[in-house]
Image (cartoon, grey):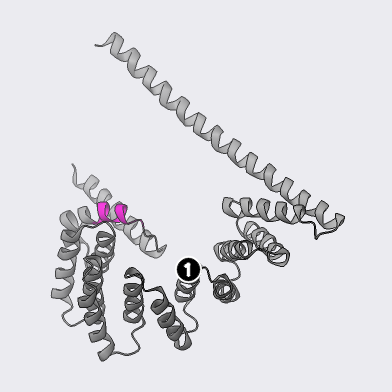
Amino acid sequence: LSKNVLIIVFTEMRDKLRKWREDNHRNSEQIVDVGEELINEHASKLGDDIWIIYEQVMIAALDCSRDDLAWTCLQELKRQFPGSQRVKRLAGMRLEALEKYEDANKQYDSILQDDPTNTAARKRKISILKAQGKSAEAIRELNEYLEQFVGDQEAWHELSELYINEHDYGKAAFCLEELMMTNPHNHLYCEQYAEVKYTQGGLENLELSRKYFAQALKLNNRNMRALFGLYMSASHIAASPKVNATVKKANVKYATWATNQINRAYQVSYARLWTVLLCILDGLVTIAVLQTFYP
């Protein structure tokens, strides 16, 4: 390959990794594919960016069970930043991936001994409890953590999921309410809150569920889960013997609208799929014709 082509390839790979970092994407397989080649072929060109890339690739490698790559990245980071608490945490994450939970806990305890306010180490210890199936302990630790760091949205979301897994929907709803107060334009929080209220059941909860599915759609009209949720909640309300004719009529209207939107979305998807298939078939026919004339 020419020098110019190599520069373009290097730039594209570097920019891809940066974009994924900035967007907080956890597309680990792609990060490993791009990152491993970038490290192996272009490490000398990366300057100080190499260290954040080592960290990014290491975390992705742990997700993909690539301990060889994770170990390589970790060793480079240790050499560059001996004694770094951040690198110690990465070492703990590798121990977690290897299911060496006791050793990982010791690593995080060492970090917290030096810095009791290190939130990342505290949350890793909670992740270990989750991995060990100790949900009650993880919930207790997360609640204690949130008493000190009430603004940590990731922790509130984690706690809501733990409560959902324990079928404690009232407390899960409370966690999601906290998230919606701090981030009212996040359609996923609205959708998840609506799902929890729908699961709780009862007319009042169903009405709240329908309201928040509708809000999720207002924030993102491509949210198919919210669209199905709106249909389900409106249909259940319309079928309830406790509602009057006016409420029933309104909810039949909502459910019908949702049904039409779902049908339209699937028709568009099938049309796009059909276009792609026709292009593929056209390509195969062209290849077959060429093989006939030029065997």
**Farthest right residue?**
245
The stretch drawn in magenta includes residue 32: yes
| x, y percent for residue 154 | 45, 73
Q: Name the residue: 55% across, 75% down.
A: 171
Region in magenta = 27-35
Query: Does residue 245 appear left or right of residue 58 in this picture?
Result: right
Residue 164 lies in the magenta stretch: no
Residue at the spot of label 1: 161
Q: Residue 69, how many percent across, how many down?
A: 18, 59
Number of marks drawn? 1
Type of amino acid under label 1 = Glu
Q: Position of residue 46 (x, y in %)?
A: 22, 63
Q: Nearer the viewer, residue 180 or 17?
A: 180
| 227 displayed left or right of 112 | right
Name which quarter of the figure residue 57 lies in: bottom left
Element carrying mark 1: helix
Residue appearing at x 80%, y 56% in the figure: 241
How would you rate the neighbour count of disc 1 (Cα within 10 Å): few for under 14, some for 14-19, many for 20 or more? some
| Quarter containing the N terminus | top left
Quarter of the image where one finds residue 289:
top left
Instruction: Residue at 43% x, 80% y: name it.
Output: 142
Image height check: is 36 above or below 174?
A: above
Image position, residue 222 (x, y; %): 58, 51
Residue 110, located in which quarter of the rendered image?
A: bottom left
Return the residue nearer the eye: 277 or 165: 165
Per the picture, the main secondary structure of the magenta-coloured stretch is helix
